[in-house]
Amino acid sequence: MTVEIVDPATGLVTYRHELMGAADIEQRLQAAADAFPGWADHSLQDRGAILRRIAAQLRTRRDDLQQAMTHEMGKLKAEALAEVDKCAAACEYYADHAADYLKPQLIDTEAQRSYVRYEPIGCVFAVMPWNFPIWQVFRFLAPAFMAGNVALLKHASNVPQCADLILAVCRDGGLPDGVFDVLHIDNEQAAEVLRDTRVKAVTLTGSERAGRSIASNAGGQLKKSVMELGGSDAFVVLDDADLDKTVAAAVKSRFDNSGQTCIAAKRFIVVDAVADEFTRRFVEAAGERQYGDPNERGTTLAPMARADLRDELHKQVQGSVAKGARILVGGEPIAGTHAGYPATVLDQVGPGMPAYDEELFGPVAAVIRVKDEAEALRVANDTRFGLGGSVWTRDPVRGERFAQRMECGAAFVNAIVKSDARLPFGGSKQSGFCLLYTSDAADDSLRVDLGGRRIIKK
Ligand code: NAP
């Protein structure tokens, strides 16, 4: 089957590629199985040296990777370059720290010596999304490689050139044959790959819908799984928030990457005392986001990744307006053949509206007004998601107390939710679960960020 790739900034087909057939898939599955014992036998030092060379290759091919991201899913040039840099840094981080994460844990017993040792499990099948097409892959790949696992990637169908470039970077960095490969396959073929006994675990980053399907398939086979799913992060503005800082962070957190970030702030829960002032300033700053060519320096709002995703988002906006939400800025697709949607702010959002109940995966902010801090906490937790959240207040003690009661994997005080290789990452509730990587095992942990001072509570 031929898949056509449409550049979301122009609406033109820029690339066509063929899905793989059964023989190609079989060859890659067997190559991974054959490569595993040798790779697992490499010393951590050797694996780390290869990962460092991969980091160097990422930097060498920075511009190619940026162009692929920009043409396939519309990412702003500056954001794409920063993403490549973050991947290179993550490779180096895991090369430096894997020995520490993986060191045997000594346990005191009556025996001469008791310890827990970490063993690789074999071939990890990765199903990845398009929103950070390079980062999402390296986020799992770097720790998986260091732990001695091999991997097969099924990337989102709209970013095949990103997938091929990742493979080229890994090969040019000296990764032995079979340790990593790309499968250009559809979701039915992916289900078959997951059922194959040579695949030992699956890691998915994607929507709840994909999570349900893949997790049930993995469960049926009793295979380990990591689910990194959607979110509807609360951004809570208390009455004593520093509004200059808060508004700037709100705009960045909602509209960077054209709003297509799992840990973007999506629900802006604002106490009445500052709601008018916050909303006025937020709307003004959102309206300054300039839609345009993602390769141009002046562009501050990229197209969405695909026209169908833009149309889905617009339906959520219309559904919310039909139930009483008010559009303060934006709210209509930008005319043209591209997948552009303007920076949009909805006010008076409440339960029963898509903007309250569902994830808005695009540049639309939902403002929910609440009377006080207690109601803010209730509304922040009134969601099936539990990825991240943030609270904004001049009082860090009050902020930390609030953050500790937010039901999510990562709660930040006066800072935007972000991922960082040094810290655990993962969602609670329906935002997923992580069981596989020692370095990523953040399930149900709570992270609080106090302007540089990070506390992780389990
Ligand atoms: P998606 O539609 O679920 O796709 C993600 C990946 O899953 C793609 O490779 C997709 O392949 C595949 N897929 C979808 N349905 C599948 C099925 N039934 N069986 C097997 N594979 C399936 O999600 P997306 O639109 O790419 O990404 C956006 C979502 O990902 C948002 O909900 C976002 O919050 C979430 N996300 C979460 C995190 C996190 O760390 N928690 C990070 C980034 C994104 P095709 O493209 O071929 O359909």
Image (cartoon, grey):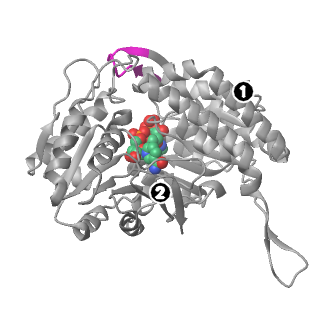
Relative placement, left or right, of 265 versus 229 is left
Q: Residue at x 35, y 14 (%)?
A: 12
Q: Which residue is labeled 1 in the image?
A: 171
Q: Residue at x 62, y 57 (%)?
A: 436
Q: Dot 2: within a 10 Å radius of its alpha carbon, few (fewer than 14), some, or many (20 or more) residues?
A: many
Dot 2: element:
strand
Q: Work out whether mark 1 precedes mark 2 in sequence or the reverse, and give the earlier one.
A: 1
User: Is residue 19 at all visible to an observer of this figure?
Assistant: no
Up-down: is 70 above or below 188? above
Relative placement, left or right, of 273 versus 127 is left
Quarter of the figure that contains the C terminus:
bottom right
**Looking at the image, in which quadrant does ligand 1 appear?**
top left
Q: Amino acid at mark 2?
A: Asp
| Foreground residue among 141 and 190 | 141
Q: Residue at x 22, y 56 (%)?
A: 270
User: Is residue 247 at all visible to an observer of this figure?
Assistant: yes
Q: Dot 1: within a 10 Å radius of its alpha carbon, few (fewer than 14), some, or many (20 or more) residues?
A: many
Q: Position of residue 62 (x, y in %)?
A: 58, 22
- Residue range (magenta): 1-14
Q: Are the residues tagged 1 and 2 within 8 Å (C-beta)?
A: no
Q: Quadrant of residue 394?
A: bottom left
Q: CA distance from mark 1 to mark 2?
A: 37 Å
Dot 1: element:
helix
Q: Amino acid at mark 1?
A: Arg
Q: Which of label 1 and label 2 is nearer to you?
A: 2
Q: Which residue is labeled 2 in the image?
A: 449
Relative placement, left or right, of 201 versus 208 is right
Q: Residue at x 41, y 63 (%)?
A: 429
Up-down: is 202 above or below 397? above
Which residue in the rendered view is the most extreme toward the right? 112
Q: Position of residue 409 (x, y in %)?
A: 46, 60
